[in-house]
Amino acid sequence: MVQLFDFISIGTLNIPFAFQVDQLSAIFMLIITGVGFLIHVYSTSYMHEEASDQYARYFSFLNLFVFSMLLLVLGANYLIMFIGWEGVGLCSYLLIGYWYKNKDFSTAGRKAFVMNRIGDFGFLLAVFWMIQHFGSLNFGDVLGKAAGMPLNDKVLVGITLLLFLGAVGKSAQIPLYTWLPDAMAGPTPVSALIHAATMVTAGIYMIARSNILYTLAPVTQGVVAAIGLATAIFAASIALKQNDIKKVLAYSTVSQLGYMFLGLGVGAYTGAVFHVMTHAFFKALLFLGAGSVIHAMHHEQDIRKMGGLKKQLPVTHWTFLVACLAIAGIPPLSGFFSKDEILSATFSVNKIYWVIGVLGAVLTAFYMFRLYATTFLGKFRGTEEQERHLHESPRAMTVPLVVLAILSAVAGFIGIPAVLGGTHQLENFLSPVFAGSVALQHAAHPDHTTEYLLMGISAGLSVLVLLYAITRFSKKPDMDSPGGLGKLLENKWYVDELYDMIVVKPLHRVSVLLNNVAEKMGIDGVVNGVGKFVSYGSRQLRLLQNGQVGVYILIMVAALLILFIIQLFVL
Amino acid sequence: MGITQLLFWLLTTLTLGSALMVIFSKNPVYSILWLIITFFAISGHYVLLNAQFLAIVNIIVYAGAIMVLFLFVVMLMNLNMPSSPLKNKWLMFAGVISGGSLLLVLVAALKDTEAMRNGILMQTGDIGLIHNLGKVLFKDYILPFEISSVLFLSAMIGAVVIGKKA
Amino acid sequence: MTINHYIFLSVALFCIGIIGVLTRRNMIVIFMCVELMLNAVNLLLVAFSKMHFLSASAFDAASKAGTDAQLFVFFVMVVAAAEVSVGLAIIVMMYRNTHSVDVNFLNRLKH
């Protein structure tokens, strides 16, 4: 822990500008800088068509983002974390609206920003509450003081719920998730870095960092788990019917973030962080692979117009396949271990949650392989000109893909659970951070037979669905607009429309009303009234200055009289 | 009531009466003549207070020089037409009211003051004699005296310059 | 006689002067009312001088207390004379320009 200088010092409140490196920060730093580096390399090639000043703008935003993200994970108190938190929100906005000349894209940026602000509001309130209650924002002080508090203390529940609101905004959970799919308007490497690998995991980081608070507030944990699970299954269902390659990945991200929150909610903090890490690898890989496909297809993002890209894009194809297997939770790839850890922790807390979780995992396998099969297998369905220009991406793009593919494949081995004969190095590594919570949890681990069974069920179901999806979609992808439930899913359960109706429209109407009534009559009335009053008053006062000496003298005498009266009788 | 008191009341009545006539006469020439009478009455007060020098100066300078100058101006320029009735009746009314209330306020304020009971040495005392005043004026007040001569000079030049213009 | 006789006389004279200034429009009459007010002050100065002399001579028969006040009156007369000479010159010039001595005619101060 390094203290640089006093940032804010008022009375007894002292907030230093301090950094703190521990196991949790270290993991996140490795993810950010590692994945960030690969994406920078990838970007040099992906963005080469941009004009040089735009290119510079892109990289300055990207590096500002990396800076903010590092600030977020390195801060030794909630305020520094909040600075980074806001910084990544800003960079997200800037990068989503990178092609700002397109109105839809800048609108998407604005939407992301506004949704993030709603969450930030919760975070900020939590910070104020912490100042009021703990008198400090340092992790050490707050977590230390909180550790002595009783279970489900009202203050703790309040603070954790508000913090969770911040996490919901930043990590795109229900009900604030709609910005993330729209955020795909940004350049694809940005989607990979910000909206898949790092920024959206800031909420996970914050909750993992405050794990002791959450462990002490089971009410909040229940909320976190429920929202995480709901998001996981809900976003997965939407992803089933999306046809935009990046949209599918976006909803998949939301869904996976839901799993992480589920992990946090059931107290599997290590599992959540583990999933953050593996997810960073395979989701970055998926996005970069998608970027490579989009690059090859000349900015065509509709998977119905792709197909059969296996031959032309071999490297992309193989790496994408690895990522799909990883995210679908096929052993022994990384996603299997992290997802399984979360699910087995869920099982020990709530069996129904586990069933829904497995259903979500199966859905994940289905839509990922629908995506894979439609894109890479079958026959090419694009125009002839596109077909002629199909080409494998340059090495600056394929090398990061390969590196990420290797990481996706092997990253799971640092967290092999005891049941499979591993030692779970990650858990040992992180144990100092989560020691307080682990001590408080008495979750009975399911015995080994059950665990084998659970793994077998989820992995087996995933494989079955995977094979079905490949056979189903490699030959004839669903080209027609679906009806019924499919239509509902394709239109994302009409959530955007619902929000538009219940939040945006009434707000718009209220603001129109305020504009017409309060603005025109109230504020304008006051301002104009002041002006009119002064103008009227001066016109009346001007009559006093009529140049008639007699009147001046009269006023002088009257004033003298008043002064005399005050002097002689009042005082 | 001794002769002094009698004279005081007589002179006071004359002063206030003629002062009122000054402001109520329609014709400026009458105003001037009433003002001269007022000045004479005030000089009488000075004599009563044994300030003979000031009494004489008042008559010579004010009643003699200044009022004659007024008369000259009025008569030479034929200004003695009665002033036209005021267009602004309320202005006149307000003037009388405010002047009267000023008088009332001052009288009411000073009426019960303890210092008001202090006596005044009438008729005797030599400080008002020219012998005494001259000594002080030319010893202690020589500088203001000389400066006042400069003031006169500049006033004279000013009057000439203004009169020559136009 | 006590000092308040003279004070009330002076206040009355002064207020008559003020009323004259406020009600009359003939510039020469206004001027005369100013002279009236000056004389009210002069009279009060002399009265106070004698009051001062009376209280001082009770302790010292040869006291010259109060001389200053009478010299002030003298200086007031000096200033008044100078003022009248300039003021009348202005009135004459104004009459030559406007053929009136009505102060309300002089409302150019507005502009």
Image (spheres, rainbow, N blue to C red):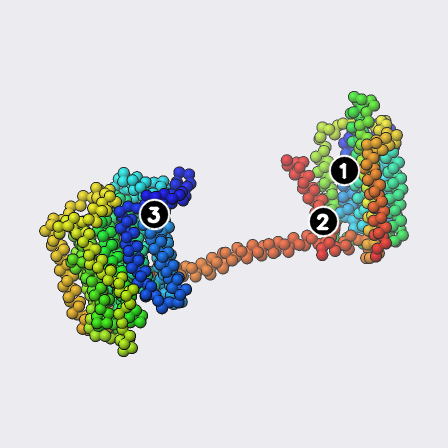
Q: Amino acid at mark 1?
A: Val
**Label 3 with label 1: CB-CB less than 8 Å:** no
To which chain does the residue with label 2 belong? A
Q: Circle 3 sits in a helix, a strand or a loop, which is it?
A: loop
* Residue for badge 3: A75
Answer yes or no: are tags 1 and 2 on the same subunit. Answer: no
- The image quadrant of residue A49 is bottom left
Q: Amino acid at mark 3?
A: Gly
Along the viewing direction, whichever of A44 and A131 lies nearer the viewer: A44
To which chain does the residue with label 3 belong? A
Task: Count residues near mark 2 (Cα–Cα under 10 Å), then give few for <14, some for 14-19, many for 20+.
Answer: some
* Residue for badge 1: C11
* Residue for badge 2: A552
Evaluate whether residue A544 shows in this view.
Answer: yes
Residue A210 location (% of width, % of height)? 29, 46
Q: Residue furthest left?
A: A449
Q: Residue at x 41, y 59 (%)?
A: A510
Residue B164 location (% of width, % of height)? 86, 54
Which label sits in the foreground, 1 or 2? 2
